[in-house]
Image: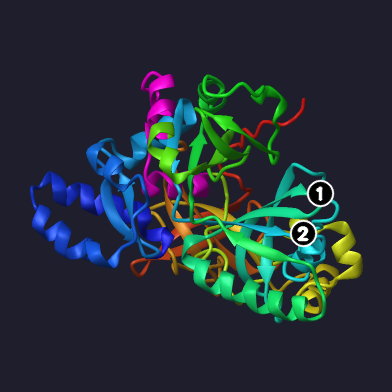
Amino acid sequence: MRGAGLWQLGQSITRRVAQGDKKAVARRYFASEAELKKTVLYDFHVANGGKMVPFAGWGMPIQYKDSIMDSTLNCRQNGSLFDVSHMCGLSLKGKDSIPFLEKLVIADVAGLAPGTGTLTVFTNEKGGSIDDSVITKVTDDHIYLVVNAGCRDKDLAHIEEHMKAFKAKGGDVSWHIHDERSLLALQGPLAAPTLQHLTKEDLSKLYFGEFRILDINGAHCFLTRTGYTGEDGFEISVPSEHAVDLAKAILEKSEGKVRLTGLGARDSLRLEAGLCLYGNDMEQHVTPVEAGLTWAIGKRRRAEGGFLGAELILKQLEEGPSIRRAGFISSGPPARSHSEIQNEKGETIGEVTSGGFSPCLKKNIAMGYVKSGSHKAGTKVKIIVRGKAYDGAVTKMPFVPTKYYKPS
């Protein structure tokens, strides 16, 4: 299921359930249970009113008892707890783990301080994006990274293929896939004060992008101050046997203000924050430069290259790409993935990759790719929805200001 449809899917399920048509919902949206993988929190979601849908081969909650609109607003005002255990965490270890990873990603991994991380992109030989990932340099010989659920199989095959060749030449690198751990994302203004109740570590000294290994609620966790909402927050890798207890403890310590939140609100939150969803806003044929992720290419990497597709990417940095990702505000019904974008003359200049109604701004927002020159803020466009043209304009992203916790 493509992510741009998550918001729509949630609305459709809500309508049908409200109409009492639960059998139709089951037939239309739910694969048989035998086909889907389940996180250790699956029964906890169901017990708490989670509406479960297939996503990247997993049964995941699209929403709970509240609406996607309410969930989105509550995350920004109070906080949200997401189960993102379908995503794949892994560790690379060995004295050559950094030079190995730098062959595959655009980040200056060697330049990261221990205990810090960054967003990066795995590239292919043509400079396209295989996946985006948050990577953390735990130590000089230990890298921790998380890859997207829908890309897990191809990412792991890609890493393994290159690791075999690297090791055959004497490189010292090995890996461990953390299938024994679950991943929770705690986001929103109450994330830090709530989590502080459950750990002795002073979280006020842990800034955006930083990583620690510490005990939380009695469990040995990997904690990264990051997220996918634009809010302050954390991603917590916890041994799976402790995941349900940790989720319960977080909800209890927040006194009900932090709520379980599903994929529907996660999609609207990341869109408001101007963040890409792989499979929609990034693909195998889209380069990091075209995707607006030039900032993620380390200065040293721009000078030296050395990653897959570097020749084309460095050429784009020098000459500029032919297309660029941009944000849009539009009138009429919300734009959706593949909605055509035209200039004022009615000429096609691109298409929408993600779109929806912003619960926080109370207006339609979207992102997509347009020809270079048409990507500048204020440029007037027409967006075609169901065969009809509606007025729109290019706007800067993020649509909603980010609130990452950084040193003042």
Horizontally, is 172 left or right of 28 in the view?
Answer: right
Horizontal and vertical percent position of residue 203: 65, 25
Which stretch appears magenta? 247-272
Q: Which sits in the foreground, 100 or 397?
A: 100
Q: Is residue 63 above or below residue 296?
A: above
Q: Is residue 187 above or below residue 319?
A: above
Q: Which mark is residue 242?
A: none
The residue drawn where x is 39% and y is 49% is 263
The residue drawn where x is 9% and y is 53% is 21
The residue drawn where x is 87% and y is 58% is 299
Horizontally, is 384 left or right of 93 in the view?
Answer: left
Choose top left, top right, bottom left or bottom right for residue 161. bottom right
The disc, 2 or 1, on the residue closer to the chain's N-terminal end is: 2
Q: Which sits in the foreground, 350 or 71?
A: 71
Q: Secondary structure at mark 2?
A: loop
Horizontal and vertical percent position of residue 151: 51, 67
Residue at which label 1 appears: 112
Choose top left, top right, bottom left or bottom right for residue 211. top right
Residue 262 in the magenta stretch? The answer is yes
Q: CA distance from mark 2 to mark 1?
A: 9 Å
Q: Which sits in the foreground, 172 or 368?
A: 172
Label 2, residues with CA under 10 Å away: few <14, some 14-19, many ≥20? many
Residue at which label 2 appears: 107
Residue 323 in the magenta stretch? The answer is no
Q: Secondary structure at mark 1?
A: loop
Horizontal and vertical percent position of residue 202: 67, 22
CB-based contact (under 8 Å), mark 2 and mark 1: yes
Horizontal and vertical percent position of residue 245: 39, 32
Q: Amino acid at mark 1?
A: Leu
Q: Which sits in the foreground, 37 or 315?
A: 37
Q: Is residue 349 visible?
A: no
Q: Does the magenta stretch mainly form a helix, a strand or a loop?
A: helix
